[in-house]
Each structure stands twice: as C-alpha cells, then as structure tokens.
Amino acid sequence: MYWQKKFQESNPDEEMEELIKEIFEEHHGNYGYRRIQIELRKRGHLVNHKKVLRIMKKLHLRCTKFTRKSRKYSTYRGTVGRVAENRINQRFDTPIPYQKITTDTTEFKYYMKDPNGKMVIRKAYLDPFLDMFNGEILSYRLSERPNAKAILDALDEIILLAKNCPYRTTIHTDQGWGYQMKAFSKRLKDHRIYQSMSRRGNCLDNSPMENFFGLMKQEMYYGVVYESFEELEQAVEAYIHYYNHKRIKAKLAGMSPVEYRKQTSQLSA
C-alpha cells in the first residue's frame, strides 16, 4: 500500500523540472547547475543549488559540449612596425566602461565543395574588441582572410564608444602585424587613445580575450561543421548576441554583460 500511494502521488517538483529543462535548452546545454540556479533566482525562484543539481541529474541534463585543443592562430610576423609598451600589465579589472579594451584575431575553419564535388577547407578570421569592464564584445569583423581593413573598421566603432569614457581609453593587443601597422597606431594617437601590447609569446598578458575565444569555440564551433562562410558568419553573429545579452556571468552578479553595463550606468547616473 505504501508504494502504491507513492506512485499515485503527484510530482511536487514538476513545475521546477520543466523550468530547469527550459533554461537548459534555451542556453543550448551550456549552463551547469550553478548558472541555472542564478537564472532561476533572476526569475523569482529561490532554489538551493543542491536541489537544482539533483533535478538535473534526474533529467539527465548535462553539458556535453565537444572540446578539443587546436593550434592557436598567431598574427606575429616579427617587428614590422611599432611595438608599444605593456600598459595593462595583467591589470584587467576596471570599474569604468570603455576604459580598458582588448582585441586579438582568431581563426575558424569551414568547408566548401570545389567544382569536382570534393570538400575543401577554407578559413575565416574574427577580430573582436572586448571591454574588460564587463567582458562585452563591443565590435567585431569576420573576414575570409587576415586584413587591415577588418581591424580598422572594427576599431572605428570603438573610437566612437571611447568618447563616452571619462578617462583616456587604453586598447591592449598582442604584437601581431595588424596592431604594429602605422595606420592602427596613428588612429589611436589621433583620438588620444593609449596603445598597449602584450609581451611576445605570453598569452597570459591577454587572457580576457583568450578566455572569450576558448568559450566561444567550445560553445558554438567545436564539433559543428559549417559548410559555407555565410553559415559560419550567421553562427558567429548569433553567438556574440547571445553572449552579450543573455549569457550570465557569476562575476557580474549573475547578469549578462549588457545587463551589467546598463545597471551600472543607471546607478552612476
């Protein structure tokens, strides 16, 4: 009789299970139990993280994103222009939007059919600018080959945003050829923006950008085959919008980068 009554009882966690499943699927399986707990709290549900973990185990909700190590794309071509001093020097934190911005280039691969129907590998290059204040991607360009125009076009958007900063902006990069070129340095100098560069071969000097690349490739690239530049471009655009507007961070008090920037600006107004 005891077990018969047990089987006849309704599930008291049914609503919570559906909500956790909804959040998990909404974020494409990228959220673990701690982020889901934060998201539940934002939606007005105070739930212990142990209960969230228990429900996720019951529903077999587990992040199974494919990860692998890949060759790091390097833009270093020797000293081809001006190498700036390392003004940031691993001091990445700042309470001021647009004060410290970093950028780098990363490589993606996609596949296309040649005239004979054979699949061939093509490459694409992403140049994003990230605000160290909240980790937000402020501007970016995706191109089919490394080129100065992509970097400078994305930089022009940053220059407009930097006018809103009460202090002089610093843009931090590695020693890649694109950041040593005269056009890049001159544009910064003309707009009174400091230039900062990592030490050669030291990825820790630009870890905010490296961390973003690792996260992005884990969540939208590894394990997925893109069959055209346009398909990859759409995926990059969708992911950056998701990352900026919806993907919460524990270090930002459980807010997305855009939410955190907006709330901070309201408090300081």
Image: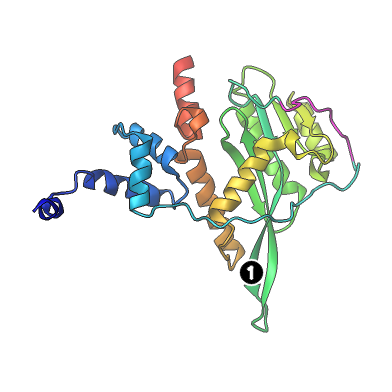
Q: Tag 1: residue type?
A: Tyr
Q: Is residue 252 left or right of residue 42?
A: right
The quadrant of the rendering that contains the N terminus is bottom left
Task: Check disc 1 and report the residue beneath it.
Answer: 111
Residue lying at 33% horizontally and 53% vertically, measured from the top left: 59
Image coords of residue 41 (percent x, y)? 34, 32
Q: Is residue 54 magenta?
A: no
Q: Residue furthest right?
A: 79
At 66% from the left edge and 31% from the top edge, which residue is drawn? 101
What secondary structure is found at the residue carrying circle 1? strand
* Principal secondary structure, stretch drawn in magenta: loop
When the figure is inspected, residue 82 is found, relative to residue 14, above or below; the finding is above
Query: Residue 49 at what x, y percent from top left?
Result: 38, 36
Crowdedness near tag 1: few (<14), some (14–19) or many (≥20) residues, C-alpha within 10 Å: some
Q: Where residue 110 sits: x, y (%)?
A: 64, 65
Q: Residue furthest left?
A: 1
Residues 222 and 3: in front is: 3
Check the image and report above or below for 192 versus 204. above
User: Which residue is rendered at x = 73% and y = 36% of the image?
Assistant: 204
Which quadrant would residue 107 be assigned to in this image?
bottom right
Q: Which residues are magenta?
A: 81-90
Does residue 269 appear anywhere in the picture? no
Closer to the camera, 197 or 115? Answer: 197
